[in-house]
Amino acid sequence: MKKYQHNFTILSNSAVNEEHFIMELQCREPMGLVKPGQFVQIKIDDSPTTFLRRPLSIHDAVTSKGILKLLIQKKGDGTRKLSTIKKGDIVNLLYPLGNGFRLPENKNLLLVGGGCGVAPLLLLARELKARNCKITTLIGARSATHLTIPDAYSEFGDVLLTTEDGSTGTKGFVIHHEIFRHGMDIIDGIYCCGPDPMMKAVARLAKTLNKSCQVSLEQSMACGIGACLCCIVDTKKGHVCTCTEGPVFDYQELSGWGDKE
């Protein structure tokens, strides 16, 4: 798939909660095609401690209008700098990178996101809906104040919530939601993104329930094109770069995933 390096104009940059913000950008020339699960590498100017581009999942896109949305968590100096960028500013993106989710048609699917792991699931839900899939989205967070825009997913189907402190939805982690005990008979497959321990737990459930499960790995990626080898992951066919072979994998491709702890 062809890669582009384009300048984008910031249309808006809005806080979702204390930790997360959504950046909406418009390409200053015809935008390349993007797929759910792919990511961008963004250049961060005027951040003295940020020397490399930062990888960010594509949250949503309207290719015909040249618009991308990025859901970003403030983790370090680079992402904190991005949170201060204003409407009208220009940023440079290398995109679209990686391999995205494989998309079926006419299926009943469960999307599971933990924390900022919900980022790639909105464009995924949009594309699956267009393929006549029935979608349920399960979102987990530490508390109600850490949830990231669950209402946005209600456009595409039912939204289920878990919080570790029980402040909204089911108390606990996403794997504690009742759907995994009493709702999986009608689910054809699972799509998952979030911290590795969460995704491994979901993969174990998928194996037990005999369901397909695609996971989007959250690896450190310095270059995004397979040159630096810092995002190596162990698969059943050997070590591969997450940025070029993934970030989306079938859990059965990954060594040890789906196995009991």
Image: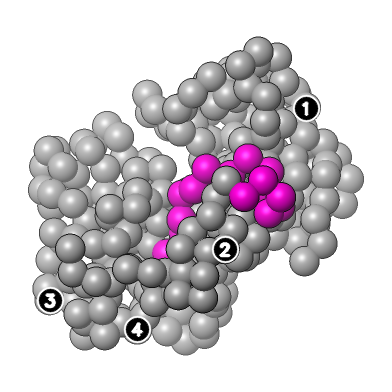
- Residue 100 position, x and y percent, is 58, 65
Q: Position of residue 170 (x, y in %)?
A: 13, 52
Residue 123 colored magenta? Answer: no
**Earlier along the polypeptide chain: callout 3 or callout 4?**
3
Furthest toward the right, the residue is 29
Q: Are marks 2 and 1 in contact (CB under 8 Å)?
A: no
Q: Are marks 2 and 4 in contact (CB under 8 Å)?
A: no
Residue that numbered label 3 is attached to: 182
Helix, strand or loop at mark 3: helix
Q: Tell me the distance, in whole angstroms, between the alpha carbons under discs 3 and 2.
A: 37 Å
- The C terminus lies in quadrant: bottom left
Q: Which residue is mark 1?
A: 90
Amino acid type for the residue under numbered disc 4:
Asp
Residue 54's place in the image compared with 256, above or below, is above
Residue at image point 87% right, 51% down: 30
SS of the residue under disc 4: loop
Q: CA distance from mark 1 to mark 4?
A: 42 Å
The mark lying in front, picked from 2 and 1, is 2
Residue 205 visible in the shown view: yes
Q: Residue at x 46, y 49 (%)?
A: 218
Residue at disc 1, secondary structure: strand
Q: Nearer the viewer, residue 237 or 184?
A: 237
Q: Which residues fall within the magenta stretch? A: 215-229
Residue type of the residue flagged with mark 3: His
- Residue that numbered label 2 is attached to: 240
**Residue 188: which numbered mark, if any?**
4
The mark found on residue 82 in the picture is: none
Pointer 2 local density, CA inside 10 Å: few below 14, some 14–19, many at least 20: some
